[in-house]
Image (cartoon, helix red, strand yellow):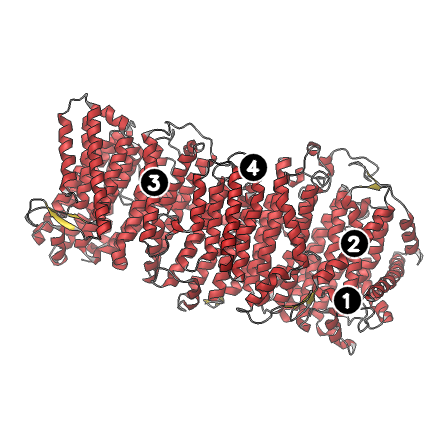
Amino acid sequence: MTFEWIQIPYALLTIFIVLNYGLLMTALIAKIAARVGRRHGIPIWQNYADLVKNYGLRSSITHGVMFYMGPVFRLTGGVGLLLFVPTIYGSVMFSNLSFAGDLILALYFVFFGTLGMALGAAESGHPYSAIGITRGLSQVTMAELPLALAVFAVALHYQTLSITEIVAAQQGGFLNWTLFTNPLAVAAAMLAFLGSMMRPPFDVVLAPQEIPIGPPTEYHSSYLALMQTNRVLFPIAKIVVYMNLFFGGATSWPEFFIKVFLIYMVSVLVGVVFPRFRVEQSIRWFMIWAVPIGILAIVLA
Amino acid sequence: MVSAIYPLAAALASAFLLGLLHERQRAPAYAITLGVLGFMTLTAASWVWGFAQTGQAGFEIYTAGVAPPFAISLRLGLAEASLMLLINLTGLLSAIHLQAPLLAHGRRAMAVLLIAVMALGGLVMTRDLFNLFVFIELIVIATGGLVLLSDDPRAVVAGFKYLIISQLVTVFLLIGIIFAYHGTGTLNIDGMAMTTMGLASGGALAFFLMFIAVVIETKPFPANGWALDIYESAHPAFAAIFSAASAAAALFAVDKLLLIGGSDWLPIATGIGILSFVGANLLALPQTNDRRLLGYSSIAQTGLVLVVLGQRDLLGDHTLYVAGGLLLANAVAKAGLFWLSDLIPKREPAAWAALRHHPLALFAFATLLALLVGLPPFPSFYAKWDLVHPLADAGRLWLLGLILFGTLLEAGYLFRWFGYSLKREAPALTGSLVSPRFGVVLVAVAAAWLLALLWGELSVHDNLLLAVPLAFALAFLALDWLPARVKNALAITGLVAYFALTYTDYDPLRMIFAVIFLLGSALTMLAGFDVQGRRPGFYPSVMLMLAGLIMLIRATDSFAFFAAWEVLTIGSYFLILRGKRSEPHALSYLLFSFGGALAMLAGFALAAQGAPSIELVALAQVAESVAPWVFLLLAIGFMTKTAAIGLHIWLPGAHAEAELDVSPMVSGILLKAGLYGLMVLLLAMGTQRLAGVDLVDLLLWIGALTAFLGNLMAIFQEDAKRLLAYSSIGQMGYAIFGLALMNHLGWLMALMFVINHYIYKSMLFLAVGGVARRTGTRQMFLMGGLITLMPLSFIAVMIGIIAMSGVPPLSGFGGRWIFYNAILATDARLPIALIFLSGPIAFLYLFRLIHTIFLGQLKDEHRQVKEAPFWILLPQMIYVAILIVAALVPGLLLRHVDQYLTEFFPFGALNWEGLRITSDFGYWNPVAIMLTIGVIFMLLLSWLLFVNRRAQKVKQFNIVFSAERPYRPETTHFAWNFFAPYRKAMGFLVQPLVTRFWDLITQTLHGIGEMTRRIYNGNAQTYAFHLIGFVVVVFLLGPGGTA
């Protein structure tokens, strides 16, 4: 597959759909989580209001060049990840820019935003940002390990690194999904998933009570708007990777919406039940529970 | 040819003549002494020249005009002539050195000196047993007298002890001679050798007594306390004679006696020799007196020569070359060092720092030590190589191992000593360097280099001194007076020119290394233009290292390869030692490298199976019985250089403490030598199994563990350069892992690592070095917020860490992509989990590096800091450009390597279709990635800049801080113990177990040395007891035990 100019409007369309879906879905999820806590929760359109407000605000403050770059890196990471992975299987229109690279590109591009955000937040000079970053980085390195092992197991399983081919191999009934053909890999990956969604018990990175909101502490107005946009896009982009690798991908938008929502809900369900881990606790947790499953997955693959 | 009688007669006559002079006529007496010694030296030189030119065999000189047994005969051949030259020259130079004491003591002392030199010569030439005895007696008396030349009051006691011991020796020798004469009816050595004395009753005992008496003259461990006291207390110029000439003559006498004893006695000589070699080196470790240390070293070296004599059955005609190389090397080095010691004010080894500010004296010291240790291009290097090969072939592995172990011990204390001389507080020299006392040292240095040239010529291998890169490097010794910038320009020109001249010689694999070693180092050396002044000693060292590196990739046989390895090791050792606090780290580097080199030597020797060397490609044909061992030994050798886990403890200190522009070289360039070695090894030998273990699998595990632990240790460092150093350990682990995958893409990844690691590690070390230069610290938590003050350094570090962490779009991602494709094609699964974990961990320390230095809060003391100097930034910016180009068009270089690798690994090559690269499993389009990311990034950035166009940069402490305003950067910059949670969770993995292990080993060795040296309590009776005990034990263990 090579590049055609028409892919650009197609890609923009993907972003548009995912963005709107994300805004609504995250609000819905916030509402669900609130109801579990017997609160009423936000209105479903709240995210739109927040975003419009923040995009509308003008700031007269910056902390330097890298401070600018932080949100830019962040959103580039989110949009890029979304675009490097095909969204809808079998659709030329929504295969995005996946010709640029395979699964490995997706796996490593996840770090692009993290790195940029860490750099930007660090330039603000705020100690809470720095503390948030060390927590986040420490945790994510260990949380990513089971995912990497699972991805490797899946690649071994299908003998390819192309996401499209992996989705293709899972077509023809849900029993063909990796979930059923390679449950160990999926188990490891889903445990890793918990660690990357910034929900309890792995949300000490943002820890609102002790280090206000961690890395983004100093970000406001349009800076924050970019990051909020990413906060909607990026989890979905990650879930798309999960969906494609483990849950048979999506052949249409409705299927996409449902699968993304359900996968997202896994972390929500765990999150509303469990209290927060300290970082070293979560590192140990991943070491003890998730990593061995991942290792089993690759040894048995 | 001058008759051999004349020098002896001249010495004897003038010794008598001196007695006729008036006591006050000391100057003429001294002139006569020098004149006679000069004559003797010249005569000996003319003999050597004559024998060497004509190739004439040795001949007998009948003193009374008749053949033995009716008269005494002398023999003169090449060996005798050389030894005579050595003895007479040492005597002459020592006499020059001894000018003041000789003039003070007058003609008697001079006469004694003449007699001593004459008798030593006689001992070498005589073929008569009784005559041998007479000369030994003369030597004993003369030695006793000359010891008194010293001002040290202990010398009298030492001389007395020596006389007591000598009486015992005399008794043994005389009884032996009587019985031997009784049994054979002749006193002539050759005559006796022809009879079957061993069969006569008591013959073995008679020989034993003679043999042991002469052996004791070589001062074997442990029956040598008396000799050590002499070394310690005698005048150094006499100690020079005692070490260089006496030992040589005694060894030659032993060799003569072995002719009588025959092959039965060779193992005994070997046993005594190896015990001396290892024992004396072990005891030298804890020595605190330089001359005693030299004494131990002399004993050790004499022991080694005795081993060579004992291996005559293996070495055959080659014995002379091997023994001669070792003997002359030791003699010249010891004489030079003893002479030099006279200029040192105090007796502890650290006082040699007095040489620190005298480059010529330091050069002399370094030369003599290198000669002693047996580094290339000196004769002892050739000799050891030629000794070890037959030993390995004959299966005498214990002996081989002990020799190598002793050599390592020796290198340990000698180079520790050299480290002192450069790094310790420097006292003043006791004399001027413009004096005959230093002049004689320079003669020894000249002799060392001459011998190097000579032994190179005589060897069956290439003459190392004539290798162009080495000669070019050594030329910088002569140019050391030039300003550093001129030398830098010369060096860079030389490197580039050499590449231009030779680039057609390399296949793509070697080309990568040639580019890094020659052009890469030239690029790094641009930073050298920043240094003002002369920078003494830097250029010879760096060029020596680079010469070694380039000789390494040009080597086709094991000898050239090993010599290159030693050259690069020693060059880099000198280079690392230049750092301010690098003394212990440089030593630890040297010991690991040297130990690794000895393992390699053993490996090559095993592989060669009796041949003097082996073609590197012929490693593939090594017999199956030894192949796994060869593989193991060579791999250990190479892995000491790549700092694989367990052998890594030298690296952090060595790389961190090195100078600003040295760190990038020893990290970015030098480490690749080990990888190159592993590549050569794996290409030739492939997989090997030892005791059911696949060694390549083992390598895979070592690589994975190294990558994991190296990275993990890096995240806990507070020192920026140590962080980078640990990260190098991890990176090398990755490369080893890639090689051990033994598939196409694994190798491609390893090669990509070779290139990438060179670029980003050189860049990061330069950047961090520049920051450390400006801030005056390497502790990251003491820095912070430097981004606005040092923006270019920041950019270099940022690009470096993006590339290194493997985040797209920079070149590190390509490495990761190839890596994933490579592991998909392998069956090894478990180590992969470790490798997976080490990747994200690398991300942690990289972030820490950039955050704690450049981001966060600026410290008050750094508010005036300037950007790093131009010449340090320039190479960094070039590296940035290279990284970006490499990210866009990785095929530029990789494509050729990919094709080349198909020769060895036909399956799994990449497809290069236009901008797209595909493998069996996936695909990758660097340009598309770069464009996509670039466009999104630029769009968002422009928008953000546009909407915030009025934003002002606020002051440092203008942050949301619990309604407070912080005012101290120290309390606001979150940097120290940055990854505390990680330490809590994983800290148990980075306990310094390996360091403790190696510490324990060195402490144990020192402890054994310290404990054993207590047997030398200074009591003459004890020494006599040692001697008798030694004789009895040797007798019981030797033929006496079975008779």
Mark 4 highlights which residue? B531
Discs 2/4, front: 4
Q: Is residue B767 left or right of residue B490?
A: right
Q: Position of residue B910 (x, y in %)?
A: 63, 68
Report the quarter where the N terminus of chain B lies: top left
Dots 4 and 1 on the same chain: no
Residue at x-position 28% and y-position 32%: B234
SS at circle 3: helix
Return the mark for residue B873: none
SS at circle 4: loop
SS at circle 2: helix
Separation of residues labelled 4 and 3 (CA atoms): 31 Å
Residue at x-position 76% and y-position 45%: A66
How would you rate the neighbour count of disc 1 (Cα within 10 Å): few for under 14, some for 14-19, many for 20 or more? few
Q: Is residue A247 left or right of residue B131?
A: right
Discs 2/1, front: 1
How would you rate the neighbour count of disc 4 (Cα within 10 Å): few for under 14, some for 14-19, many for 20 or more? some
Dots 4 and 3 on the same chain: yes
Q: Position of residue B1018 (x, y in %)?
A: 29, 35
Return the mark for residue B937: 2
Report the quarter where the C terminus of chain B lies: bottom left
Discs 3/2, front: 3
Mark 1 highlights which residue? A3
Chain at numbered mark 1: A
* Whether residue B250 is visible: no
Q: Are marks 2 and 4 in contact (CB under 8 Å)?
A: no
Mark 3 highlights which residue? B446
Separation of residues labelled 3 and 2 (CA atoms): 66 Å
Chain at numbered mark 4: B
Separation of residues labelled 1 and 3 (CA atoms): 71 Å
